[in-house]
Each structure stands twice: as structure tokens, then as C-alpha cells.
Image: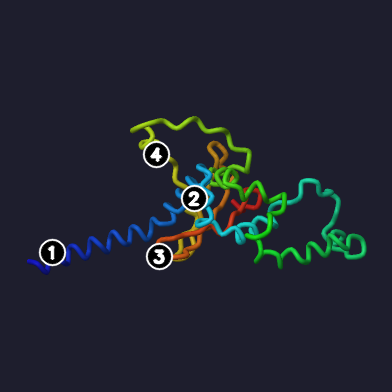
Amino acid sequence: MVRRELFKIFVLCLVLFGLAFALAPWFAFRALKANARDQDVAGLAEMVDLRAVRASLRDQVHEPNRAPLESDETAADIWRDPLGAMRRALEPFAEPLAPLTPAPARLEPYLTPAGLYDLTRGYAPGAAPPEPPPPQGLARIIETLSEPWPALRFWGVDRVRFAVRPPGQAGDVTVLTFQRTDLFQWKLVHVRLPANDSL
């Protein structure tokens, strides 16, 4: 009798552990969104690998004032633009120092709490509509529980990708990749913007 009860407790603990293990990435996404919304910089520092996210955005976000007819060969030509060519050659080596150095101006909006919050909602930084003031009491709990969860794009033991779409814009997909850092801890390591998505 006692052995059967111990077996039931063991099975229940195993099921709860499996659920917590499988749902940890979703809770990490919601925690990232809440920390970004509430401007919790310390919480974001624990949940975002800034160096990896910056590296993922570097080739997706271009300078807004770049000449449209300038070719990549001309841009990398050391004879026509030696300083620009040297800067582009040394840029990958600066990535290990990324948390200690300021982000390039074109990436700054994506790495701020407000920018990360817009990304978790599927919008470009600064393009999200303002949110209505949150309700109080029981209505706030109901609204929190009824918030749409991100669509699962890939689930692995140590890597998970979520697809986030703004309401009414099914074609604009922002993909957020989380990597496991501990048994139940996940970090944002990659962002794929809608213009670079294959869906």
C-alpha cells in the first residue's frame, strides 16, 4: 500500500517535472516581454545575450542613409574608402566586446527595452501601436491569462524558436530564438526580422 502511494507520488513528480521542462521556454518568452514592457534592465540582462542578438541583427539592419547604387565591392574597396573598408573588416572582432561598447546607431532601437518589447509583439521598434491602460483586479488576471502565446516554430532540447505576428499582419513574422542556459533557464540569442523571413 505504501509502495503504491510512493509510486503515484513519483509518477506525479515526473509528470510535473516534464511539464515544467517543456513549458520553460514559453515562460521565458513571457518573462522577457514583461521585463521589456516594465523597463526592467536587470531582468533583461539575465534573459538576453546582447552580443549574440546584436550579431544576428547586424546583417539585417542597414544604415538608413546608405546610397542605393553603392555596390558591396565598391563599399569594401580599400582604395576608394579605406576607413570604411577597415571598419567593416574589424567589426566582427568587436563582437566579444559588445556588452562593453555602445551599439551602432542603426541597432540601438532594437536593443532597448522598448525595442525588445515591440519585437516580442511582432512590430519593428517604434512601430507598435500604444497599448490601452491595463485593467485592475480580476480583469487584469483574466487579460494576462488570455494574452496570445507565440507560435512555436521549432522546439528542441536546447533551442526554441517562436514566431510572433502583429494582429492583422499575418505576413510579417518576427522569429525569436531562445537557447537553454540551465535546466529551466533560457536566453534570447537571435532575432530574425520579417523582411528576412522565408514564410
Mark closer to the chain start, 4 or 1: 1
Residue 8 vertical placement versus 65 (above, below):
below
Amino acid tagged 1: Glu
Q: Amino acid at mark 4?
A: Ser
Give the left or right position of residue 72, taking residue 117 as reference. Answer: right
Label 4, on which residue?
Answer: 146
Q: Earlier in the sequence, mark 1 or mark 2?
A: 1
Badge 3 element: loop
Residue 32: mark in rendering: 2
Label 1 to label 2, Cα distance in Å?
39 Å
User: Of tags 1 and 2, which is closer to the observer?
Assistant: 2
- Circle 1 — which element? helix
Report the disc number at residue 183.
3
Q: Pinpoint residue 182: horizontal percent, then vertical percent.
A: 43, 65
Q: Quadrant of residue 92?
A: bottom right
Secondary structure, mark 4, is loop
Work out how far the residue at label 4 is from the one at label 1, CA to CA, in angstroms: 36 Å
**Of the two numbered discs 2 and 4 in the rendering, the one whose residue sits closer to the viewer:** 2
The Cα–Cα distance between marks 3 and 1, rounded to whole angstroms, is 28 Å
State how far apart marks 2 and 4 are (Cα): 17 Å
Mark 3 or mark 4, earlier in chain: 4
